[in-house]
Amino acid sequence: QLMILGLAANLELRHLPLGVYDLDRSEHSRAFAERFFHDEHFTPAHPIKKDAEIDRRLQRGAIGAALVIPHGFARDLMRGRSPRVLFVSDGSESTTSMVAVHHAGRIARSYGAAPTATAAGDGATADRPPSVARPPSLARPPSPAARLIPEIRIWYNPTLESRYFMVPGILALVLLVITMVLTSVAVVKEKERGTLEQLIVSPLSTGQIVLGKLLPFAGVGFIDMLLVLAVTRVVFAVPVSGSVLLLLALSSVFVLTTLGLGLLISTVAATQQQAMMTAVFFVMLPMIFLSGFVFPIENMPQPVQLLTYLLPLRYYFTIIRGIFLRGVGLEILWPSAAALTAYGLAVLGASVLRFRKHLE
């Protein structure tokens, strides 16, 4: 746990994908965009070509923020005017967005005081993100009186309410605890009491026994899911911007995954204490730390980021935040939905086969 938490626990802003929409296409606009990549706070994404791309790429999670540099940016700087630049941030992750907005404002306000431009012939093109390794230009600097005016817009959570970010995540945690932990403990409890052996000698088939063990907890998880949605909407006033039916359908897929994990743990553990410790310390806590619920995934080391693709909670958090805050549908969420479905079928199938072999 110390290794996992030590690698994942990082609330600083690092390597946030930033899309640049440069309408001015001048050396001064390129120099200003480069300022965002002088440190590790932002990393360049593929340049944005048109307005509609900003919303689409934010919805897909391809970028975490967008910088829009308007026409006439260099002309206004040279004439001592104060051009406005637009910075759009994804507010569905409130903590990350708050830090990103802070750094963007600092960079924009400091640019006029010490401008750094790049040469027109340094190989920069509209199709390639700006690079910090280019030599400074000898072009005439902008007027000292020019100061940039950053215009900040936060989408999907304009007020950066933390409960909009945290409360939907509670839905995933409730389903994880109810369906995985209780399933593993309940099945192991029957092994300890010897009632599982009584079921083996009964006329019931192995499939019927497995179904009988999973259905009650699936029902409890579904009821808890409805309760959490009601409390989220009525008590905490967190709106569901997308389809509730889609949320319920994909939540059912997540429940199948957690049921499979619980059944798999029950085939490994010999006692209830072992089942509880295995579920909590080896499955649940790593999922919480590495799924993006507490710490941004882009802040983690690259090997740890690759490890997060093995966690179903990562895909489910993408789904619930997309539906709750961004209001997107299956046309945007299908990669996460497909990955979660494949993961759920694989885990549930493996756990049923192992449980059947254990019974035999």
Image (cartoon, grey):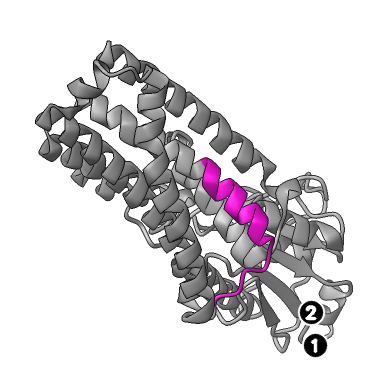
| Residue at x-position 44% and y-position 54% | 172
| Residue at x-position 76% and y-position 61% | 55
Looking at numbered disc 1 in the image, what kind of residue is underneath it? Answer: Arg
| Residue at x-position 31% and y-position 12% | 357
Compared to residue 303, the image places residue 317 above or below, namely below
Q: Main secondary structure of the magenta part?
A: helix
**Residue 340 location, quadrant:** top right
**Label 2 residue SS:** helix
Residue marked by disc 1: 81
Instruction: Write down the region rendered in magenta.
Output: 238-253
Find out whether residue 235 is within the magenta segment. no
Residue marked by disc 2: 77
Side of 172 where 266 appears, left or right: left
| Residue at x-position 62% and y-position 58% | 322
- Report the Cα–Cα distance between label 2 and label 1: 6 Å
- Residue closest to the eye, 11 or 241: 241
Q: Quadrant of the N terminus?
A: top left
> Where is residue 224 drawn, in percent x and y?
42, 59
Q: Quadrant of the C terminus?
A: top left
Side of 199 where 345 appears, left or right: right
> Where is residue 335 drawn, in percent x and y?
65, 39
- Residue closest to the eye, 173 or 315: 173
Crowding near the residue tagged with mark 1, few <14, some 14–19, many ≥20 C-alpha atoms within 10 Å: some
Find out whether residue 250 is within the magenta segment. yes
Tell me whether the residue at label 2 lies in contact with that at label 1, contact meaning CB atoms closer than 8 angstroms.
Answer: yes
